[in-house]
Image (cartoon, coloured by chain):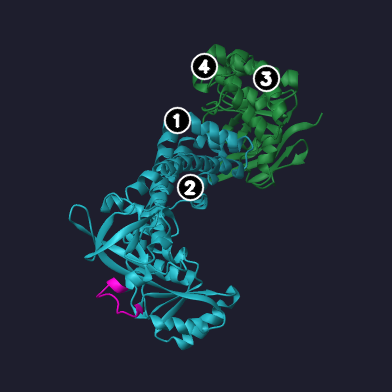
Amino acid sequence: MLWLAWKTLLFEKVRFFITIVGIAFSTILVLTQIGIYLGMMGNATSIIRNSDADIWITSKNIQNFDFANPMPEDRINKIRAIPDILWADRLILTWGFLKTEGGGQEQVQIIGFNPDTGVGAPWAMIYGRPSDVKGGRYMVIDKSSEHRLGALIPNSVWELNKKRFKLVGISGGIVSFTTSPIIFMSYEQAQNFTEGFLEPNDTSFILGKLKDKKNINKVINELKKTMKDNDIFTKNGFMLKTIKYWTIQTGIGMGFFLTAILGLIIGGAIVGQTIYSNTMQHLREFGTLKALGAKNEDVYQVILWQAAMNATAGYLIGSILIILLKEGIEKSGVPMYMNFMIILVLFIVILLICLLSAYFSIMKIKNIDPVMVFRS
Amino acid sequence: MNNSLELINITKRYLHGRIEVLAIDRVSLAMRSGEVLLIMGPSGSGKTTLLSMMGCILKPTSGKIKIDEQVVSGMGEAELPDIRKKYFGFVFQSFNLFPSLTARENIELLLRLKGFRKESIMDESQSLIEKVELSKRADFLPHDLSGGEKQRVAIARALSGDPMIILADEPTANLDSRTGKEILLLLRKNAIEYGKAVAIVSHDPKADAVADRIIHLEDGRIKE
């Protein structure tokens, strides 16, 4: 029956072409939405994900990583006092204004990390080393900021909040959710120069590493008892909290979700409509098949194979186009995350929708009376 | 000799709106291998209904249908397609070929449906094409074939898998007189040379010449 489905599809090339163009369009729409959403969420959680910490301690009722509130940094001692903790370190997240070459300024996200331990340091360096920020007003800026800040020349001097900082390193692919350029500097520098955001002995986060991950729940419960003014998260828990905030509370997720669903509905409707009109046009042939001894299941197979072939051809074209366009989209500053698993899972979803859209055709086939073949 | 197909006291009633119509009224007949049976009668006499029941496409309201001594009238929808596949070949007035398939592929489709092995499908379809003298047109699509050629393809398809019984519904209705005669002779040849039981429903007076037996149907009853 696969053979008959293929022959019939190819016989009506224009219809087949229109259908696969429709599915390819739907695929592009859905994959773009999913890719951009995952890219944005990946950016929102990249520093948490790339840290080596098992637990994150934040100020109470924090909404997400980017909205950090200050807390006394000496709370780190409570964490270090727990025998199950291997190490604990502090991380500052704050904001500043960086003057650009033309005299303008850009708001930047500042990450202050401990260059001795490297906790919270940039993980992908194009030039220099994270530890180069140690010992003075030195900073690392991400390469992706160039289109906003201008050329990043190693050892050039920049003005950040009216203080001069030397560019000692360039990281690659580290982008914030807000798309503000990310600047990495030493913890001490970040703490000293961010007047207005942090008090002298404040920090934004305390990160901890466990000796044995199996004890994570025990450690978190213990910390929750002793640090009532703080929130304690596992690494994944903090990423989830951040993703939930941007997805649900800002409505961004709903926007992406609705567009993706719209794409799936469009794809399903195109295939359903095509298959149905195809079925109606070939009703007599299907009736003949039944009269000649084909069972309903045999005829259903023709319909389902046609739906599957449409879905596969359209999806293949759509996903190849997206893979080719991905780099260009990312270069324009839009984050996009795509991997084989996403492409595979979405293929299964689109395939299922296309098969479901053949439902009305199958119902039509089910009710064909083969006696019709004797009517001229 | 055993009957290939036997209808015993067959009745078919159906509802047309609220009115019950008696389409076939207590018809009994038998078909034997090698025999051509011609069913004639005016429009609305029940010829097509009778042919549909003979081919196990339509179930009778009452009565018994036997194929090769096996009672099939009590069988359900799950079993009847297999009976049709095994015992019958159909030839239709409008040919009912698949427009996307060549003449050869139309024949191969039924061979596939009947479960023929891939390697034997080509040999079998070639032999059927030769039987109906269509070798030169085998790879043409139906819309490139004449009416007569289409009906030859339909006959070759009906013969695929070597069924016992061939049922032809007005096989000459869409053909010119000469071609119609050729098709009737081809059906006759199949009865004689290959031992098929052939039933033809027709208005065509030329069909008399190929029939071994003629029954006239009127108001759903056989008129002697």
Residue assigned mark 1: A13
Q: Earlier in the sequence, mark 3 or mark 4?
A: 3
- Can you tell which mark lies on residue B126? 3
The percent coordinates of residue A153 (x first, y second) are 31, 50
The part of the chain drawn in magenta is A192-202
Q: Earlier in the sequence, mark 2 or mark 1?
A: 1
Q: Residue at x 36, y 80 (%)?
A: A71
Q: Are marks 2 and 1 on the same chain?
A: yes
Q: Secondary structure at mark 3?
A: helix
Residue under numbered circle 4? B146
Instruction: Mark 3 vs mark 4: give the one in front.
Output: 3
The residue that disc 2 covers is: A354
Q: Kindly identify the residue that appears in the image at 48 percent across and 47 percent down.
A: A354
Colour green maps to chain: B
Extreme residue in the right direction = B1
Instruction: Left or right? Give the position of A120 relative to B121.
Output: left
Q: Closer to the observer: label 1 or label 3?
A: 1
